[in-house]
Image (cartoon, grey):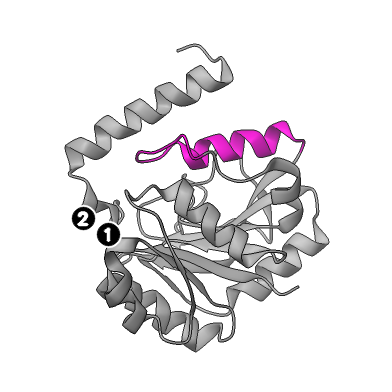
Amino acid sequence: MSAVIVTLSKFPDVFEGLSESVELHEPGRKVVVFSGDAHDHLERAAVGWEQVCGVEPFVFARNANLGIRAAAPSDVLLINDDCRLTGPLVAELERLSRENPEFGLIAPQVRGGVGNRFQREQWRPSDLTVSTERLAFVCVFIPRSTLDLVGLLDERFTGYGGDDVDYCHRVRAAGLKLGITGRATVVHGDGRSSFSTSFSRVMTPGERSRSMGEMEEMFRRKHGLGK
């Protein structure tokens, strides 16, 4: 089945940029997951989207899983609400996934200072390149076959980061590869920001830094890794 776009949002003004780019480039591929405290506002902003009520307090992994379940049995493009599509990239990611089943996750390039060094637009990978580093889930294509094999995101990662690090680790442990393609690009924030527009509203820089440390420690404990 055709892949479904899944996004999480608490902020209608942020969501509108993604919504407009999807309407332009990918009409018909729509699922939005939103937190309960933003229900009324997002209901108006997301007219025409399938809307799944999220859970408070907001936890990325928990609400992402709600959207992934709602998209079943389709593949999923999981994308931040503070991103914008630059073209009809889903079909390209579907093609790459179909032709390269050994890849468990495929990420496009990101215009904006986020993601590992290979995800950033300044570095131009080939049609599909194996990533030696974990993928930041700014925008990632997750085949349903990966979800069936690896499962959903670990909802115990409740802070900033950790859930994507853990999922990439699990994908590799299942014998699959992480991929990045130079044939598709998304814009994150204003294309220059090194932080998430959404997370910058719910966490201060200090809180994000502390949370990242806590999630890293949790990851190490879960997988029995030393410092």
- Mark 2, secondary structure of its residue: helix
User: Residue 88: image x %, image y %?
Assistant: 58, 79
Q: Amino acid at mark 1?
A: Thr
User: Residue 179: image x %, image y %?
Assistant: 65, 50
Please name the residue that numbered disc 1 is placed on. 197
Q: In the image, 180: left or right of 85?
A: right
Which residue does the image show at 61% across and 71% down from the upper left? 4
Which residue does the image show at 36% across and 59% down from the upper left? 112
> Callout 1 environment at 10 Å: few (<14), some (14 to 19), or many (20+)?
some
Q: Nearer the viewer, residue 98 or 143?
A: 143
Q: Is residue 184 above or below residue 113?
A: below
- Mark 1, secondary structure of its residue: loop
Q: Is residue 138 magenta?
A: no
The stretch in magenta equals: 155-175
Q: Quadrant of the C terminus?
A: top left
Q: In the image, 88: left or right of 15?
A: right
Please name the residue that numbered disc 2 is placed on. 201
Q: Is residue 106 above or below residue 168?
A: below
